[in-house]
Image (cartoon, rainbow, N blue to C red):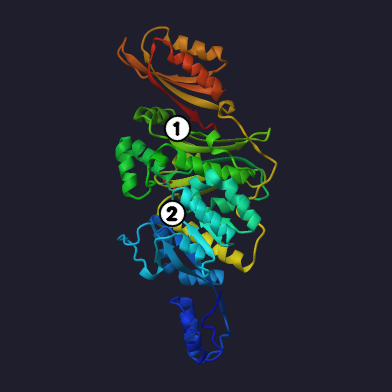
């Protein structure tokens, strides 16, 4: 759709194009210059019609920030991004952000039927309806922008297959790490790199909770309540704390980095719900900080590890200093070397910033079609390394009887499995009482470590649930 704005050969022309002259400062200033009789030339502004599905925290953020920076976006993209319809679940609901009633519909299908809508922005949440909306939008040649990480992690293969068939771009920057442009970096800036490793703190809520627990001594429930109040947590915070919000993001990043859709059901995902304050304290004594970390690595054999786990990060590693709701992603490529991305991984405005970036990309794609449809499949990788074969150091805390021979029995079982201990801490207790025994374990395959732990748990001198965490080796 074309719209002529304020490109004025002569002052009298201003009236003719005023219906397209929206509220942006850029146009006003041009119009003013035109009104003064200057010959500013004819400027053609393309309107891009947007259909917004979902008006929750992020949807409202997109709408408000689009209004706020409309003139800037016009200048930068040469297009006017115009929201034509907003599909919501409850039409009559009272909302924090005012939404012109003429735009609202209770039917997401209306976005598909409206020929003025060229880009569908899916921010509904959930799986079934967003999937149907996206597939139908692709079928009708409408560009898709989505922030739905669970949907992409589960159905990315199908969505991008259809997108490639129909030659329709699908953009999804907001799906990973909120305002950090990591998708664009991995897909475009680092296109010439083999990704050797990616480490990420990619769930702001869990990082916020862990930060509050370690710095202010809050318990898990109090820290989670704070995170929810601040609007960081998902509607169902279970996904934040059980690791799956980060798990979905890790699947998307790994799939993009290695060119095949990683099956999410085979990815090891552990959450932070069971992290005990004492593990945070022991980690600190040993010079580490506990973080929920995504591990994405390709080995020399081409197999790819993808996991999300609480891990002890050496304090000298820059990821250990990422506090609060911030996210950080450390990328190592064989050409670029190390690169670090840091920023707000959650919240209305940072996430809206990524959606708006995608909308600008959509505007550019509409002006000059591109070969990429958002995901670049290739065949150089293609195998997920089973979690049991991943080798790493570990932290192990056991509750044990404090009596002679206990350490020897535990060390014996580890030794039999070929697993070495690098250090031991046992805080002093009264003789005969129960004690915490903390072992730092040298590199070991996870499968072997778990098998040895099973035998250790069966010892009569070992009590309570053990805590086993991976240790990030690089500082
Ligand atoms: N709730 C997520 C987080 C943001 O805390 O990082 C959206 O993925």
Tally the numbered discs: 2
Residue at 51% of width from left, 38% of height from top?
294
The reply to whether discs 1 and 2 touch (Cβ–Cβ < 8 Å) is no
The one of 211 and 382 positioned closer to us in this rendering: 382
- Give the Cα distance between marks 1 and 2: 39 Å
The one of 116 and 454 positioned closer to us in this rendering: 116
Label drawn at residue 46: none
In the rendered image, the vertical position of residue 295 relative to residue 365, given as above or below: above
The one of 195 and 368 positioned closer to us in this rendering: 368
Mark nearer the viewer, 1 or 2: 2
- SS for callout 1: strand
Left or right of 465? Residue 135 is right
Q: Quadrant of the N terminus?
A: bottom right
Residue 177 visible here: no
Task: Point out the tag, 1 or 2, that comes first from the N-terminus.
Answer: 2
Q: Quadrant of residue 360?
A: bottom right
Label drawn at residue 288: 1
Residue at 56% of width from left, 89% of height from top?
9
- SS for callout 2: loop
- Asked if ligand 1 lies within 8 A of label 1, the reply is no
Query: How dense is the environment of label 1, judged by Cα within 10 Å: few (below 14), some, or many (20 and up)?
Result: many
Left or right of 414? Residue 381 is right
Percent position (x, y) of residue 77? 55, 69
Percent position (x, y) of residue 282? 39, 27
Percent position (x, y) of residue 376? 64, 50
In the rendered image, the vertical position of residue 327 relative to residue 456, given as above or below: below
Residue 283 visible here: yes
Which residue is label 2 attached to? 124
């Amino acid at each position: 759709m074309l719209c002529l704005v304020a490109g004025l050969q002569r002052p009298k022309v201003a009236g003719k194009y005023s219906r397209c002259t929206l509220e942006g400062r850029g146009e006003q200033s041009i119009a003013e210059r035109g009104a003064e009789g200057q010959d500013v030339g004819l400027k053609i502004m393309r309107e891009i019609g947007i259909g917004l599905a979902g008006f929750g925290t992020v949807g409202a953020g997109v709408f408000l920030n689009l209004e706020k920076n409309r003139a800037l976006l016009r200048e930068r993209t040469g297009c006017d991004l115009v929201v034509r319809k907003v599909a919501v679940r409850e039409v009559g609901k009272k909302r924090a952000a005012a939404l012109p009633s003429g735009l609202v519909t209770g039917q997401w299908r209306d976005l598909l039927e409206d020929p003025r809508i060229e880009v569908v922005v899916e921010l509904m949440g959930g799986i079934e309806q967003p999937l149907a909306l996206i597939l139908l939008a692709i079928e009708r040649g409408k560009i898709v922008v989505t922030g739905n990480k669970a949907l992409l992690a589960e159905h990315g293969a199908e969505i991008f297959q259809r997108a490639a068939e129909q030659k329709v771009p699908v953009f999804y920057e907001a799906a990973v790490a909120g305002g950090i442009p990591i998708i664009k970096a991995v897909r475009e800036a680092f296109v010439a790199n083999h990704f050797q490793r990616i480490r990420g703190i990619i769930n702001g809520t869990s990082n916020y909770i862990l930060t509050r627990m370690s710095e202010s001594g809050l318990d898990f429930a109090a820290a989670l309540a704070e995170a929810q109040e601040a609007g960081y947590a998902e509607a169902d915070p279970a996904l934040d704390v059980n690791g799956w919000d980060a798990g979905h993001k890790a699947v998307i990043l790994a799939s993009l980095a290695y060119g095949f859709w990683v099956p999410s059901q085979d990815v090891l995902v552990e959450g932070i719900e069971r992290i005990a304050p004492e593990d945070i304290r022991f980690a600190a004594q040993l010079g580490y900080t506990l973080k929920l970390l995504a591990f994405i690595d390709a080995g020399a054999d081409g197999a790819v590890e993808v996991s999300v786990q609480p891990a002890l990060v050496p304090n000298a590693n820059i990821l250990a200093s990422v506090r609060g709701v911030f996210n950080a992603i450390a990328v190592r490529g064989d050409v670029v070397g190390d690169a670090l991305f840091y920023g707000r991984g959650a919240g209305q405005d940072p996430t809206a910033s990524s959606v708006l970036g995608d909308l600008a990309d959509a505007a550019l794609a509409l002006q000059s079609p591109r070969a990429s449809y958002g995901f670049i499949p290739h065949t150089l990788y293609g195998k997920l390394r089973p979690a049991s074969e991943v080798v790493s150091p570990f932290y192990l805390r056991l509750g044990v009887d404090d009596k002679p021979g206990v350490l020897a029995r535990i060390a014996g079982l580890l030794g039999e499995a070929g697993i070495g201990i690098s250090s031991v801490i046992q805080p002093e207790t009264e003789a005969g009482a129960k004690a915490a025994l903390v072992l730092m374990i040298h590199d070991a395959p996870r499968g072997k470590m778990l098998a040895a732990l099973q035998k250790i748990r069966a010892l009569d001198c070992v009590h309570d649930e053990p805590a086993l965490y991976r240790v990030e080796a690089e500082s």
